[in-house]
């Protein structure tokens, strides 16, 4: 009996010792797993980027419970650093640095996986009146056919539910909305469709963005049309590499480029066709560089620079509302929006900010008047690789929004001299026929 008891105690001791020996290893793995899947909502404007792109960060740990795009395996093969973005597992960077990838897109071309964005098709005879209620877009007239329009989906208070792209085809509308707003947008569109003869459905395609000065050269061999005749924002259904796709000349980088909606089973083939054009000149690019490129180009990131309390007037996006829409209204929140246009009375305005000293402004930093009064907040901030200066976007009181106005940016306990700059920070290179 004594021998049995001693043996049992010894066995328990041995198991406990083994458990304690391996516990640190398991905790480290759990920590890496959790860290690897940290959500990234404002990539370059967040201090997470340096951590997420550090050399020891391995792509061998899959993110649990995240949706994967049809290009997920391609990202893993290319050793993309995968992160959680709006519930999707997406690459924040690949093996190149953010700065190298940024300059490469501006001088050659890069391919981005933007399949996380929700693609919607709206059919029915009331599709135009319906979308003109849901957004401030003007889609009437033949000049609007097969041309993408950047627009704002508004609520009854005049706030921006989402910014999106909408294209009118002869028998349907094609929308692309932000991934973080997908569920909200889907529910909103269905909530206001009563009384309209419309059918709303999701398009489960992948979406690839080919961006940069070489984009047209890369795409041309794969299509039968002359891309030199395809103007900026033109959108057509084309055969690309043997597959029927929706091709729109647009992007989120300030450069010439295309967004190609492709059936999911053909996405990897098309992705590799682009890269195989010349892998020295065509690089895969992730969310991090997409953020730095859009910021230099003065483009808003929903959730940072836009939200459902921000009006088009405050966001400096009045150009999205045509003369006809201003006269006729008909969109949600028209009373608030049109009143702000008429009276020019509003409490804040989106502006560009450039630091005049060393430092990197971050989202949430306070904007101060020269006298030290808090007059707004930074919504996006980063270091511009091209300008080699810290830049950002902020909302300030309209009296401080004039270009050249000196301001202060307070980061923690330090203040930095800054100035209101014209947006975009860099001239855009959109294609013109």
Image: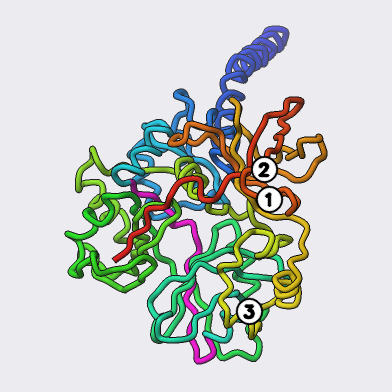
Horizontal side of residue 275 vs 206, given as left or right = left
- On screen, 123 above or below 379? below
Q: Which residues are magenta?
A: 110-127
First in residue order: circle 3 vs circle 2: 3
Between marks 3 and 2, how big is the CA–CA gap? 30 Å
Horizontal side of residue 103 vs 163, given as left or right = left
Question: At x 39% / y 55%, what residue is drawn?
Answer: 70
Q: Can you identify the residue that label 2 sits on?
A: 405
Q: Can you identify the residue that label 1 sits on?
A: 401
Horizontal side of residue 38 vs 257, given as left or right = right
Question: At x 21% / y 46%, what residue is drawn?
Answer: 276
Q: Residues within 10 Å of mark 2 (few under 14, many from 20)?
A: some
Q: Position of residue 213 (x, y in %)?
A: 29, 50
Q: Position of residue 360 (x, y in %)?
A: 60, 31
Please state which of the two labelled residues, at mark 3 or mark 2, is closer to the viewer: 2
Between marks 3 and 1, how big is the CA–CA gap? 24 Å
């Amino acid at each position: 009996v004594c021998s049995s008891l001693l043996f049992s105690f010894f066995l328990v001791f041995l198991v406990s010792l083994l458990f304690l020996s391996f516990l640190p290893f398991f905790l480290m793995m759990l920590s890496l797993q959790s860290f690897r899947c940290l959500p990234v909502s404002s990539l370059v404007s967040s201090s997470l980027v340096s951590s997420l792109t550090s050399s020891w960060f391995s792509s061998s740990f899959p993110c649990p419970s995240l949706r994967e795009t049809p290009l997920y395996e391609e990202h893993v093969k290319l050793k993309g650093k995968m992160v959680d973005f709006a519930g999707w597992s997406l690459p924040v960077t690949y093996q190149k640095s953010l700065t190298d990838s940024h300059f490469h897109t501006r001088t050659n071309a890069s391919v981005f996986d933007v399949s996380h964005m929700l693609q919607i098709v709206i059919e029915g005879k009331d599709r135009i009146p319906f979308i003109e209620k849901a957004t401030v877009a003007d889609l009437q007239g033949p000049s609007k056919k097969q041309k993408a329009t950047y627009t704002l989906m508004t609520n009854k208070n005049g706030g921006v539910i989402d910014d999106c792209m909408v294209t009118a085809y002869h028998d349907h509308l094609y929308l692309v909305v932000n991934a973080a707003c997908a569920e909200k947008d889907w529910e909103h569109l269905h909530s206001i469709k009563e009384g309209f003869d419309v059918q709303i459905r999701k398009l489960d395609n992948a979406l690839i963005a080919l961006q940069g000065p070489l984009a047209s050269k890369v795409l041309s061999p794969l299509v039968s049309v002359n891309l030199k005749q395809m103007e900026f924002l033109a959108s057509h259904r084309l055969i690309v590499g043997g597959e029927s796709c929706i091709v729109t000349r647009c992007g989120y980088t300030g450069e010439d480029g295309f967004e190609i909606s492709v059936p999911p089973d053909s996405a990897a083939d098309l992705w590799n066709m682009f890269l195989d054009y010349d892998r020295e000149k065509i690089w895969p690019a992730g969310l991090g560089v997409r953020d730095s490129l859009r910021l230099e180009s003065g483009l808003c990131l929903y959730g940072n620079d836009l939200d459902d309390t921000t009006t088009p007037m405050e966001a400096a996006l009045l150009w999205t509302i045509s003369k006809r829409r201003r006269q006729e209204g008909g969109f949600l929140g028209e009373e608030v929006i049109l009143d702000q246009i008429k009276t020019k009375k509003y409490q804040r305005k989106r502006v560009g900010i450039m630091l005049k000293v060393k430092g990197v402004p971050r989202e949430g930093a306070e904007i101060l008047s020269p006298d030290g009064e808090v007059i707004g907040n930074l919504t996006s901030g980063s270091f511009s690789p091209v300008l080699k200066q810290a830049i950002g976007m902020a909302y300030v009181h309209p009296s401080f929004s004039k270009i050249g106005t000196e301001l202060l940016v307070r980061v923690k306990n330090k203040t930095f001299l800054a100035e209101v700059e014209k947006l975009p920070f860099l001239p855009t290179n959109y294609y013109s026929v």
